[in-house]
Amino acid sequence: MTHHITPASTAVREGDIDSDTVDAFCAHIAAWGCSPNTVRAYRTDLQLLLADSPDISAVTFSDTAALWLTANRGRWSASTINRRLASFNKFADYLDVPGLQGYRRPKASKMRHTGITFDQVLDVLDVLELGVPGLTAAETRNAYAMVTLCGTAGLRIHEAVAADWCDFGGPCEGAVELLVHGKGDKERLVPVPQKPLRHLDMLGTRELHTLRDVRQARYLINKAFAACGYPKVESHQLRHAFATAAYKASHDIVVVQQLMGHADITTTQRYIGTPFAAGAAIVSSMERA
């Protein structure tokens, strides 16, 4: 949902921009329903700009922000620049000044294919069930929960950390429904395989896991996969592996989009890396004999 941003006061629009201005803006968009993660990202982007341009004012904001992005274009990824453009355009709306809509957006490079496959995700779960040297019992359980949620249900790492037993519903077609609290406070239902959930349930603890920090969860996934012989595996690669396997099993990109919680189907296309040969086969099959 797109919210209309009420402009700041005349005093703010005509004066210098400082940390108080940023705080007021962040409080404003939070009141309009922006998620805490979005507010935090916007605040960080503006604070970085202010650190490099302390004398910036509302009048010079857009030009200064554009020059700053251009100066750092070689250092940042396309996705980082595009996110900061979104932050600055929202802030410009708040200041009621022209934004950066004319700024040339860099093209995001295609996602690299994951270095881990869905079968390897399942192999790691099998190893974790038996116990992994170098991991404590608590680490093993927490890693098992994260790999299950990210690798066999396609959750984002912050969604996996937020999940608990109370979010699960009843069984359906060999899986169990999970209510996921996703980006932008959006919710979706995803199926989670019953087998790994039964293993977690047999461990007999009241909590699905004891992780409270995304960074800790990422570190633990990396540590668990490294212990199983797969070094340098990141949490997002598990989600990528899941999307690829789900598409191969269904050949239905819309279903995969819904499972992943993508607002835009083009994002799903980048995840599954739809091969050219598949499109060519479809086109050739449509020709008259």
Image (cartoon, grey):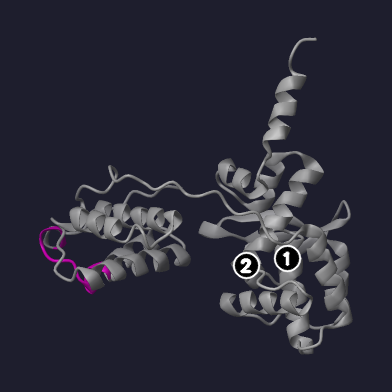
Classify mark 2: residues with Cα within 10 Å, few (<14), some (14-19) or many (20+): many
Q: Which residue is mark 1?
A: 149
Q: Main secondary structure of the magenta part?
A: helix
Dot 2 or dot 1: first in sequence order is 1
Could you tell me how far apart the alpha carbons at marks 2 and 1 are, in whole angstroms?
8 Å
* Residue situated in front as seen by the camera: 262 or 188: 262
**Residue at horizontal 30 percent and vertical 70 percent from the top:** 48
**Residue at horizontal 80 percent and vertical 64 percent from the top:** 120
Q: Please, is residue 4 above or below residue 182 in the view? A: above
Q: Amino acid at mark 1?
A: Leu
Q: Amino acid at mark 2?
A: Ile
Classify mark 1: residues with Cα within 10 Å, few (<14), some (14-19) or many (20+): many
| Picture quarter with the C terminus | top right
Q: Secondary structure at mark 1?
A: helix
Q: How far from the left and from the top, in percent, is residue 135? A: 76, 87
Residue 42 within the magenta-colored segment of the rendering: no
Could you say which quadrant of the image residue 121 lies in?
A: bottom right
Q: Please, is residue 190 above or below residue 105 in the view? A: below
The span picked out in magenta is 12-22
Looking at the image, the residue that sits furthest to the top is 289
Could you say which quadrant of the image residue 7 lies in?
A: bottom left
Residue 17 within the magenta-colored segment of the rendering: yes
Q: How far from the left and from the top, in percent, is residue 89? A: 30, 52
Q: Please, is residue 3 above or below residue 44 in the view? A: above
* Residue situated in front as seen by the camera: 75 or 184: 75
Q: Secondary structure at mark 2?
A: helix
**Residue at horizontal 15 percent and vertical 58 percent from the top:** 13
Disc marking residue 157: 2
